[in-house]
Image (tube, rainbow, N blue to C red):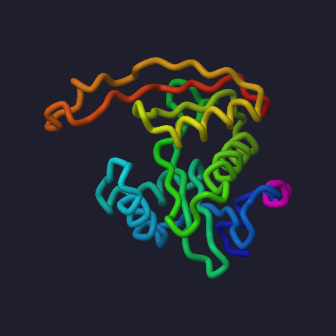
Amino acid sequence: MTAAQADLPTDLQAKFLGMPEGLRLDTPGVTDGAAIWRIARDSKVLDLNSSYSYLLWCRDFAATSVVARDADGAPAGFMTGYIRPDKPRTLVVWQTAVDHAHRGRGLAGAMLDGLAAKVAADRGLDAVETTITPGNTASERLFLSFAERHGAEVERTVLFDAALFPGDDGGHEPEVLYDIAPLPF
């Protein structure tokens, strides 16, 4: 068990019977930043941030993020998040991606359940928020199924209209906020 894994409660590790075989959840470290950046880049759907931002994310927001590792310990997927400053029991999921070789096995759902349980164990959790662009059906399914598994309601509102994104000349779709609450943690 790595030092980062030790941050996840033992009972939390045992909860993941739904984890695809050969994969495990872990807390990201700065050494994961480059791999996480590559997974985000290769997803072809995420807004790619600088590699520097992924390094910072793995350092500064590791407690509210998760990485899935394969049998060799290499990142197979990731989910980054943070706690809303004005809502300390709300987890905002920023980005989620699964490496192409591990897609279609339920890994994103396992990461979301694991991250929510981890944050709930550390500080309590009432809600999860994320933004999804219209037409991103994979993300919609991921978060709607999470809400259903946990008996939560989903409220959708446009958080950022497309016109707010600079330099995209209308190329960026609006970001729709999914507010998932109340959660039973």
- Above or below residue 18? Residue 150 is above
Q: Position of residue 96 (x, y in %)?
A: 51, 50
163 or 4, nearer to the observer: 163
Q: Residue at x 45, y 64 (%)?
A: 36
Q: Residue at x 62, y 63 (%)?
A: 68
Q: Is residue 33 left or right of residue 51?
A: right
Q: Magenta region's main secondary structure? A: helix
- Above or below residue 129? Residue 23 is below
Q: Residue at x 19, y 31 (%)?
A: 170
Q: Quadrant of the C terminus?
A: top right
Q: Position of residue 165 (x, y in %)?
A: 23, 31
Residue 63 lies in the magenta-colored region: no
- Above or below residue 177? Residue 77 is below
Residue 12 lies in the magenta-colored region: yes
Which region is colored magenta?
10-15
Instruction: Please give the count of numbered marks on the rendered protein.
Output: 0
